[in-house]
Image (cartoon, rainbow, N blue to C red):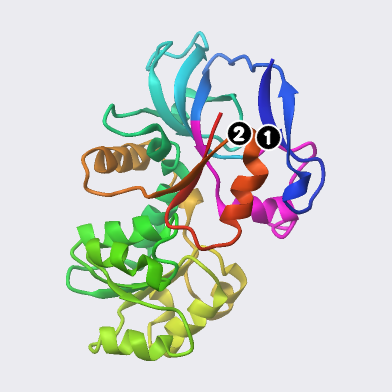
Amino acid sequence: MSRAVRFDRYGERDVLYIADVEVPHPGRDEAVVAVRAAAINPGEASVRRGVLHERFPASFPSGEGTDFAGVIHQIGEDVTDFALGDEVIGWCWTRASQADYVRVPASQLVPKPVALSWEAAGSLAVAGSTAWAAVAAVKPAPGETVAVSAAAGGVGSIVVQLLRLRGTKVVGIASPANHEWLTAHGAMAVSYGDDLEQQIRDAAPDGIDAFIDTFGPEYVELALELGVKPERIETITAFERAAEVGAKTEGSAQGTTTEVLAKLAALAAGGEIEIPIADTFPLERVQDAFDELEQRHTRGKIVLIP
């Protein structure tokens, strides 16, 4: 037997529990991975609360988790690209990675670089692919200026670094506690608050060319007030407002490919981007992990360690 995070109904963190489940067995083209690290994501909290029921309904009992990194425990008879004991990074679409073992198609795995920590590797799939897609959506050009909300969060911190790699100027919106980190990574840091619009105008007197929102609909409004064209506004959370104004909503569904994941892993392993780890928790403290996540003030990722 093994352990897996479960919830049987929509609700707050207290509906989460650890269930004893059978170790999965792979299909012909699948692998079973012993999970070493599995990041948690804000979208998982929204699914658990039922906020996204119309868009991403849950069936009960439901597992949790998409991101993971680990060691291949079993492989199906048609799998030729991986072997037992290989260290891999991957994703699952079945809400099952927050567990001791996860079963996925082998086509959803890439090798884990030796230089990449387990915590960072287990944080790449959702935040990394979302950041990659968000950056691509606004088509940033060298020398342009892009504003990023929640710029030190799990997705925002990667967005900032990917933009900088493209030669883009970045205005990062974050709490003062995160300004030093943003400045060290090449961004102009501003604080959220009543005077945010003026702070951004002061930081970028030539204007904002594009806006990537990783927090909420108020930033779509701010982007419009700053004169950003709707087609160059990207949000990963404010789907309804984006539809109303014609902004983009590219995210993990568009960015999740093995090609992108392998590129992100190489960038992180080579030190070209940092995957900040805010905290780690053992699997049995999943409620505490989400408690910290849902305060929405962490820098980088929170990771479960089975």
Q: What element carries label 2?
A: helix
Residue 258, how many percent across, how many down?
39, 36
Q: Earlier in the sequence, mark 1 or mark 2?
A: 1
Residue drawn at point x = 40 percent, y = 32 percent: 118
The one nearer the camera, 245 or 60, is 60
Residue 71 is situated, as x and y percent measured from the top left of the image, at: 45, 20
Would residue 25 be found to the left or right of residue 251 on screen?
A: right
Instruction: Assign a secondary structure to mark 1.
Output: strand
| Magenta segment | 37-64
Q: Mark 1 points at which residue?
A: 5
Going by the numbered disc 2, the residue's amino acid type is Leu
Q: Mark 2 points at which residue?
A: 283
State whether residue 98 appears in this view: no
| Mark pair 1, 2: CA separation | 8 Å
Exactly how many numbered labels are in the figure?
A: 2
Residue displayed at 28% across by 57% down = 162
Q: What residue type is labelled 1?
A: Val
Residue at left offset 30%, top offset 79%: 209
Q: Which residue is drawn at 44% across and 54% down?
A: 154
